[in-house]
Every structure is written in structure tokens, then in C-alpha cells.
Amino acid sequence: MAMKSDAGHGLDRDMAMQPTNCNGTTTPNKSYTGCHANGEAGFQTPKQNGTNRRTPSSTFTFTAEPTIEDVRRMQSEFTDERDWNKFHQPRNLLLAMVGEVGEVSELFQWRGEVAEGLPDWTDSEREHLAHELSDVLIYLVELAEKCHIDLPQAVLRKMALNRLKYPASKVHGSAKKYTEYSD
Ligand SMILES: [Mg+2]
């Protein structure tokens, strides 16, 4: 059935996303600070102390490819080859994505808190998680495509809004929602 994803999406490796600059290329180990009017991206090398200090966990990075556009194209080709576009309207894709989020949740269910890096998981369990996270990403990208949302650019705009909503100097170390902060 078209909406059941575990049969595969034509993607034989884990999906990978990495922050990109305005030209779609990656700049590893630097924080994106905004898209300039001239189309160039601003990046900031993380500081080792102060509010921009990165924890050791942030040393994990994705590979540069496939890009989000690569994922969109691969899934588009996959559905075209199977004449499945007639099933892949936005609402159906949304429901399919939520179903895949449920499949991710099942892998964490009843385990209690899980340490970063999943040190207690078997290789098989980690691969299962990689598959389910990929299903979520694939449907998310296809949903954005079918809604004509340019997802990479939307992420840049949303991150800019998040920085305004949660200034590091104000919220550092706090889990409060933005409505709970006073000037
Ligand atoms: Mg799945």
C-alpha cells in the first residue's frame, strides 16, 4: 500500500541534514547566524566558553549529503515510478508522517530515559531507529513539497525567529517558554 513506508522509499542510506548557507553548501562546525542581503550566509565559530559554549555532544555531525532537495527529488522519483502521487496529497502525507513518528516512539517506549548516543542499544536497534527517523524525514520533505514550502529556506527563517524569541543572553540554561520571560 502506498502509504505504508516500511517497504522502502528508494533511499538506501540514512537521511542526513546539515545546516547550509544561502547557496545550499555546508559549513561544518560553525553556527549559522543569518542570511545576508547579498545572499551570503553569516556563520559564527562556536566559542569554547560563555553563552555559545558547545557541549561535547555537539561534536556529532551529519554527512553533507543528501541535501533536503536531494531527498525531495529521490522521493519524487520513487512515487512517480510507482504512480503513487494520486495517494500523496498533503493530508495523507501528514497522517503518514504522524504514523511514522509513532513508530519512532515505539522504539523508545518503556525504556525509561535513554542516554545520548544510545550506548545501550544494539546495532540492530540503532538501524531500526535510523529507518524510522528516515521515514519521518522523507514524509516531512514530501509534505513540504506538496504544500509548496521551500523547507530549507523556511528553516532559515524560523531559526532567525527562534533567535529573536529566545535570546541566548536571556534564556541561557533555562527551559521556560518565551511567554514566561520578562524584560
Ligand atoms: Mg516506518
Image (cartoon, helix red, strand yellow):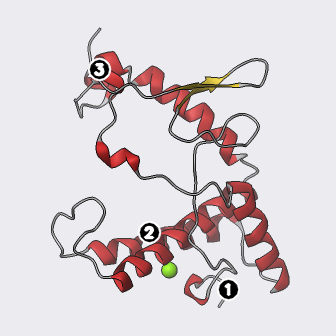
Callout 3: helix, strand or loop? helix
Query: Which of pointers 3 and 2 indicates the residue nearer the eye?
Result: 3
Q: Amino acid at mark 1?
A: Ala
Residue occupying the point 25% across, 24% down: 180
For marks 1 and 3, the one nearer the N-term is 1
Q: Amino acid at mark 2?
A: Val
The picture quadrant where one finds residue 106 is bottom left
Q: Amino acid at mark 3?
A: Gly
The location of residue 91, given as percent across then percent down, is 63, 65
| Residue in front for this viewpoint, 147 or 111 | 111
Say above or below: 122 vs 141: below
Residue occupying the point 58% across, 82% down: 5
What residue does disc 1 label? 2
Q: Residue furthest left?
A: 112
Residues under labels 1 and 3: Cα distance? 50 Å
The picture quadrant where one finds residue 165 is top left
Q: Is residue 16 left or right of residue 37?
A: left
Residues under labels 1 and 2: Cα distance? 17 Å
Say above or below: 47 vs 89: above
Q: Which mark is residue 101?
A: 2
The picture quadrant where one finds residue 156 is top right
The location of residue 103, given as percent across then percent down, is 41, 77
Say above or below: 51 vs 148: above
**Marks 1,3: beta carbons within 8 A:** no
Tell me if mark 3 has few (under 14), some (14-19) or many (20+) residues whose alpha carbon lies within 10 angstroms of its own: few
Give the mark count. Answer: 3
Quarter in which the N terminus is drawn: bottom right
Query: Which of pointers 1 and 3 indicates the residue nearer the eye?
Result: 3
The location of residue 132, given as percent across then percent down, is 47, 75
Tell me if mark 2 has few (under 14), some (14-19) or many (20+) residues whose alpha carbon lies within 10 angstroms of its own: some
Q: Which mark is residue 50?
A: 3
